[in-house]
Image (cartoon, grey):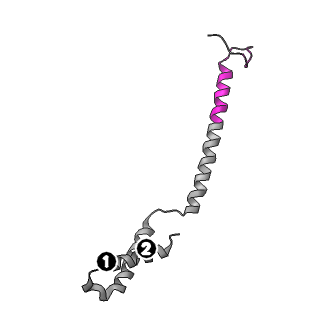
Amino acid sequence: MIDLSHIDDLARRLSGLVPPGLRESREELQENFKAVLQSGLGKLDLVTREEFDVQRAVLLRTREKLEELERAVAALEAQLAQPPGADARTPQPH
């Protein structure tokens, strides 16, 4: 969820930039700015910081699991590369 206080603040700042001749309708402009900002941000595909942090943690765990599986596959490939009857702990001559 987007913090609406930030949108209100931005709308106030934008209405403050309006030329002095249009200041009479400043409140109306501020509401229009706010509506446009909310509409524009609502169309974006945004997530909350909490959702982002959860997905980041999931990604980190997935990466760790992938690295663990890569090491296991490499160990199995090394075992399969050795001739039958060879001791897995003894390096083979080339």
Residue 10 placement, left or right of 89: left
State whether residue 24 is above or below residue 77: below
User: Going by the picture, which residue comes out furthest to the left?
Assistant: 21
Horizontal side of residue 2 vs 40, given as left or right: right
The span shown in magenta is: 69-90
Q: Is residue 87 above or below residue 49?
A: above
Q: Which residue is mark 2?
A: 38
Report the residue marked by disc 1.
Answer: 17
Q: Position of residue 8 (x, y in %)?
A: 44, 77
Q: CA distance from mark 2 to mark 1?
A: 19 Å
Q: Quadrant of the C terminus?
A: top right
Label 1 element class: loop
Q: Name the kind of residue labelled 1 in the image.
A: Leu
**Residue 10: % across, % down:** 40, 74
Residue 40 forms part of the magenta stretch = no
Label whose residue precedes the other's in the sequence (2 or 1): 1
Q: Is residue 81 magenta-colored? A: yes
Residue 84 location, quadrant: top right
Name the element at disc 2: helix
Q: Position of residue 90 (x, y in %)?
A: 72, 16
